[in-house]
């Protein structure tokens, strides 16, 4: 299975859970949406740290933020949680499905549904759709159930993982990241 990883804290619950279900899990950190590049590097380093703690492999996608900005620019004024976020989920999960297909993975899943600020039904619908386009089976999960988000916060502290205070994109940084609001 290829697990789309948006950040290390959010992966701290799904990654070991899927492995516990019997999946051979490889993490895939995608970050074209993350701004600025220094933030992307911090998150990529945290994913590598988590990979080492858990003993599971991880790979990074190429960092090409201009591609993401070009795709989302028309929606730059959308509020958080709106059409821009849905497009961002699609771009992230399409990149993961593409990587999964290219790498011979049969299954894909995401960590995005651990956040209480994101719509898990929308995320799982998009994941299923884009994985179908690439011939990969989507494994739907809602990781925030059963106090998954709370557990991710505790594990992040316990394992010393960098925990960001905004979703990552330039727009959320502008709207709240600078003020310390986790999106």
Image (spheres, rainbow, N blue to C red):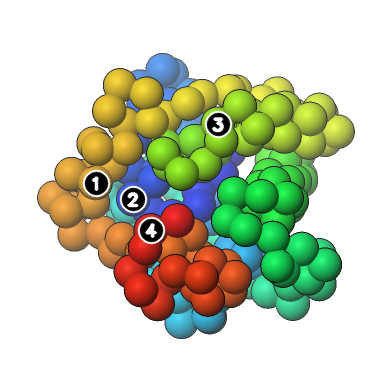
Query: Horizontal placement of 109 versus 144: left or right?
Result: right
Residue shown at the point (39%, 46%) measured from the top left: 10
Quadrant of image for the C terminus: bottom left
Residue 153 image label: 1
Q: Secondary structure at mark 2?
A: helix
Compare marks 4 and 1 and give the one earlier in the sequence. 1
Front position in the image: 20 or 11: 11
Q: Residues within 10 Å of mark 1 (few under 14, many from 20)?
A: some
Labels 3 and 1 touching (C-beta < 8 A): no
Vertical arrangement, residue 108 with respect to residue 89, above or below: above
Q: Secondary structure at mark 1?
A: helix
Q: Secondary structure at mark 3?
A: helix
Q: Position of residue 81 (x, y in %)?
A: 59, 49
Instruction: State the residue position of label 3.
Output: 120
Residue shown at the point (46%, 82%) measured from the top left: 38
Q: Secondary structure at mark 4?
A: loop
Residue 182 image label: 4
Compare marks 2 and 3 and give the one earlier in the sequence. 2
Labels 1 and 2 touching (C-beta < 8 A): yes
Compare marks 4 and 3 and give the one earlier in the sequence. 3
Of badges 4 and 1, the one in the foreground is: 4
Of badges 3 and 1, the one in the foreground is: 3
How many marks overall? 4
Question: Residue 35 sits in which quadrant?
Answer: bottom right
Instruction: Give the spatial CA distance, label 1 vs label 2.
Output: 7 Å
Query: Horizontal placement of 74 versus 46: left or right?
Result: right
Q: Position of residue 148 (x, y in %)?
A: 31, 31
Instruction: Give the spatial CA distance, label 4 vs label 1.
Output: 12 Å
Compare marks 3 and 1 and give the one earlier in the sequence. 3
Residue 9 image label: 2
């Amino acid at each position: 299975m290829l697990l789309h990883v948006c950040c290390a804290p959010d992966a701290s619950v799904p990654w070991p859970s899927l492995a516990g279900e019997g999946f051979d899990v490889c993490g895939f950190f995608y970050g074209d949406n993350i701004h600025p590049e220094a933030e992307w590097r911090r998150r990529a380093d945290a994913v590598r740290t988590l990979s080492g703690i858990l003993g599971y492999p991880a790979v990074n996608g190429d960092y090409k933020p201009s591609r993401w900005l070009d795709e989302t620019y028309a929606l730059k004024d959308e509020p958080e949680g709106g059409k821009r976020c849905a497009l961002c989920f699609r771009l992230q999960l399409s990149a993961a499905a593409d990587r999964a297909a290219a790498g011979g993975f049969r299954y894909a899943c995401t960590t995005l549904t651990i956040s209480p600020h994101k719509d898990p039904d929308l995320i799982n619908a998009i994941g299923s759709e884009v994985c179908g386009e690439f011939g990969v089976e989507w494994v739907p999960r809602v990781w925030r159930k059963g106090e998954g988000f709370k557990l991710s916060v505790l594990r992040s502290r316990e394992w010393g993982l960098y925990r960001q205070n905004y979703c990552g994109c330039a727009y959320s940084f502008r709207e709240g990241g600078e003020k310390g609001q986790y999106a």
